Structures are given as structure tokens and as C-alpha cells.
């Protein structure tokens, strides 16, 4: 049966964290948060490799390598890239940065010859292949975990600004559609230890990318778990904060999500007692690029002395709210525990 057209089991929700350095996936039973137990949340072993060892079964390296014979993913791609360095070859790494900090129009540009000596692939095509590989791994992992697949999906994303968020949401959802369509065409070839042959990959991508349906997320709404504002994505820092606050009674959480290529920062506060909501402190969320870069220092400083001053209400000359008091946050965006804005 087509994975794209297969009915989704709506008793469960899946989430893909398409990371800059590592990618993860999990499924959770559809229940009120207060009723969830550890048995209802299933991390998926998408890093596990058939007959081969893995550094971490729950993590899939976000790396693609264009070999002379085909496309390799994850740890196989990392190993091949190390061997190819002496020939001046490079892997396609940190793929999410193409969505986070690159020009969205550049997704369809052909890649540098050091990355793709065949001249066949754009960033969009390799991203779709990687996500297709991830989806095949997720399908196998759910069978082992004895949970349903496919299920409606949420996609974790960085704290993009409003303009990039609109473009990025469309790009992410389109890529997931294209990935499912690619799974339908390539199947288990996507998880083969020796990768996907170029002829097969190019043939599949040609059909997928030329089909306008796979560029229109509205054509396959059942694929995604949409929030009240009709988004399939959830901010990474918001999801972390929601899990961190939990039932501990803490009213304030500052999240520093230090990633492999980009970092997300945000400050969050709980709402009224008994209400299962989380508020983002106005203008506290942001994304920075680079490892050990001045941007990271600036981001932390921003949280300490910038708009985050509203966290303790200093801007308004008011004291911090005590536990049990309403959180009066000017311009705060309200999220539920699943990270919906």
C-alpha cells in the first residue's frame, strides 16, 4: 500500500526532529498530557542499522554523501565522507541550515561539485531523499516497538522569524510529502547498507518533483497533525520548555537548545494555576548560527538583559508574580503543551 495514501492511525501522533547534526523521531499516544505515562511515549530507534553496530540507536546522523555509485545516509555517509576527504569530496551536512539560514530559493540550485560530482542533485532533492530514508527507518522502528505506522506527524523547527516561519513551514511540509512519495517509489532501497543507486534515485525524484501535488501541503492534510493555527510544525525550544515545566510547579524556564549548527533560545512562563498552557516571553525566542560564535554569546545576553527583562517584569516596574498569581506577559504567545501557538 502507498505510504502517502495509507490511512493514518489517529490514536497516535508522531514527531520528527529533523536536526542539524542529528535527527530523532518518536510517537505518543493521543491522550491529555496529565494522563500520559512513559508507556505512551515511544522513542523510535531510527539509528539502528541492519546487521551493523550503531553509535546510538535513537539518533540518525543528518548527513548525506553522494558516492560514485549512489546516495549514502547517516553513519554510512559519515564513514564515506571521511574516506573521500583526500579526494577533495565533501558530504552534504547540516541539511536543516538550508531551511533555517539559507535562501529558500536556493533549495533548487544544483549543489557544488565537491558535494555532488554527478551534477544530478539540488539541496531539495537530497533533503527529500534523507527524509525518505528517515521515514523508512521510522516505519521499521515502529514495527519493533509495536506501535502503529503511519500516524499524523508534527515536525520540530527552529525559532524562525515570522517571515521565514511561513516559508519554512511550507518547505518542511512539502519535503515530507515528497519524502513519502519517494518512499512509495524506492521502498527498502532507501535503507540498503550500500545506499540508493543514482539511476533509481534520479528516476524516483524526477517523478516526485514534477508532480505539483507534492509541492502543495493542502493536498494531503491527513499526513500532518495540525495545530489550531493550521501548522504542522512546533518550535523546538517550546517543546523542550513544555516538557521541562511538567508538573514540577516551576513558573519560568529559559531554554538554550545548543545544536550542531544552529542554536535556539527562548524564555517561557506558565499561565494561571490549573491551566495547561505555556507562554513565551515576548520577543525572547530566537535562533543563532555557528558553533562558539559571538552570536551565541549575544543570544544569551539577549535573554539576560534584553526583552527577557519582562520575565521579572522589570520593564514595567513591577515585581515578579508569585506562584498562584496570573502571569501578566505583554505580547506573550500562548502555547499548549504540544507546542501549538
Image: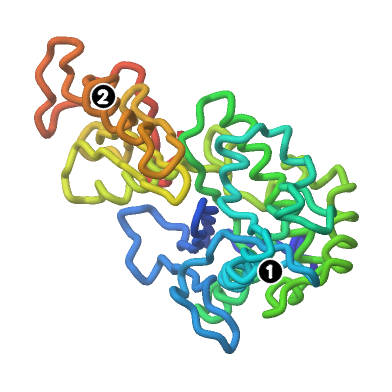
Residue 33, image x and y in percent?
35, 53
Give the residue drawn at x 9%, y 19%: 319
Query: Quick check: can you spot residue 315?
Result: yes
Within 10 Å of disc 2 (Cα), the crowding (few <14, some 14-19, many 20+) is: many
Secondary structure of the residue carrying tag 1 is: strand
Residue for badge 2: 308
Judge from the rendering whether residue 281 lies leftward or rightward of residue 318; answer left or right: right
Judge from the rendering whether residue 166 lies leftward or rightward of residue 249; answer left or right: right
Give the residue drawn at x 38%, y 32%: 295
In front of the other: label 1 or label 2?
1
Residue 68, image x and y in percent?
79, 69
Q: Nearer the viewer, residue 310 or 245?
A: 310
User: How far apart in space, not on screen, are marks 1 and 2 (Cα)?
Assistant: 43 Å
Secondary structure of the residue carrying tag 2 is: helix
Which quarter shows the N terminus?
bottom right
Residue 114, image x and y in percent?
71, 54
Residue 123, image x and y in percent?
72, 47
In the displayed structure, 306 sits above or below 13; it is: above
Give the residue drawn at x 78%, y 44%: 219
In the displayed structure, 173 sits above or below 278; it is: below
Query: Quick check: can you spot residue 134?
Result: no
Q: Which mark is residue 72?
A: 1
Give the residue drawn at x 33%, y 31%: 299
Determine which quarter of the picture holds residue 274.
top left
Determine which quarter of the picture holds residue 98.
top right
Residue that sits furthest to the bottom in the current view? 51
Amino acid at each position: 500500500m502507498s505510504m502517502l495514501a495509507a490511512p493514518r492511525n489517529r490514536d497516535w501522533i508522531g514527531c520528527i526532529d529533523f536536526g542539524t547534526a542529528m535527527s530523532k523521531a518518536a510517537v505518543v499516544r493521543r491522550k491529555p498530557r496529565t494522563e500520559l505515562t512513559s508507556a505512551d511515549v515511544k522513542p523510535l530507534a531510527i539509528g539502528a542499522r541492519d546487521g551493523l553496530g550503531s553509535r546510538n540507536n535513537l539518533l540518525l546522523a543528518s548527513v548525506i554523501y553522494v558516492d560514485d555509485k549512489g546516495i549514502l545516509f547517516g553513519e554510512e555517509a559519515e564513514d564515506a565522507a571521511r574516506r573521500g576527504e583526500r579526494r577533495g569530496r565533501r558530504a552534504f551536512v547540516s541539511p536543516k541550515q538550508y531551511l533555517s539560514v539559507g535562501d529558500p530559493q536556493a533549495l533548487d540550485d544544483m549543489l557544488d561539485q565537491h558535494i555532488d560530482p554527478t551534477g544530478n542533485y539540488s539541496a531539495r532533492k537530497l533533503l527529500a531523499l534523507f527524509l525518505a530514508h528517515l521515514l523508512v527507518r521510522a516505519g521499521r522502528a515502529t514495527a519493533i516497538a509495536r506501535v502503529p505506522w503511519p500516524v499524523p506527524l508534527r515536525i520540530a523547527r527552529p525559532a524562525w522569524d515570522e517571515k521565514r516561519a511561513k516559508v519554512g513551514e511550507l518547505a518542511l511540509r512539502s519535503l515530507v510529502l515528497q519524502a513519502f512519495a519517494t518512499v512509495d517509489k524506492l521502498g527498502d532501497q532507501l535503507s540498503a547498507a550500500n545506499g540508493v543507486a543514482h539511476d533509481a534515485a534520479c528516476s524516483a525524484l524526477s517523478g516526485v518533483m514534477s508532480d505539483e501535488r507534492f509541492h502543495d501541503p493542502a493536498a494531503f492534510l491527513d499526513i500532518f497533525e495540525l495545530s489550531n493555527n493550521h501548522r504542522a510544525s512546533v518550535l523546538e525550544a517550546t517543546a523542550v520548555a513544555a516538557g521541562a515545566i511538567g508538573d514540577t510547579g516551576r513558573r519560568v524556564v529559559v531554554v538554550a537548545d545548543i545544536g550542531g549548527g544552529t542554536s535556539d533560545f527562548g524564555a517561557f512562563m506558565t499561565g494561571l494555576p490549573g491551566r495547561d498552557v505555556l507562554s513565551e516571553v515576548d520577543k525572547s525566542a530566537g535562533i543563532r548560527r555557528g558553533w562558539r560564535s559571538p552570536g551565541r554569546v549575544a543570544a544569551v545576553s539577549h535573554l539576560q538583559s534584553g526583552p527577557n527583562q519582562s520575565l521579572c517584569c522589570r520593564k514595567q516596574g513591577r515585581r515578579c508574580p508569585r506562584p498562584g498569581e496570573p502571569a501578566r506577559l505583554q505580547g506573550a504567545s500562548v502555547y499548549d503543551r504540544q507546542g501549538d501557538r
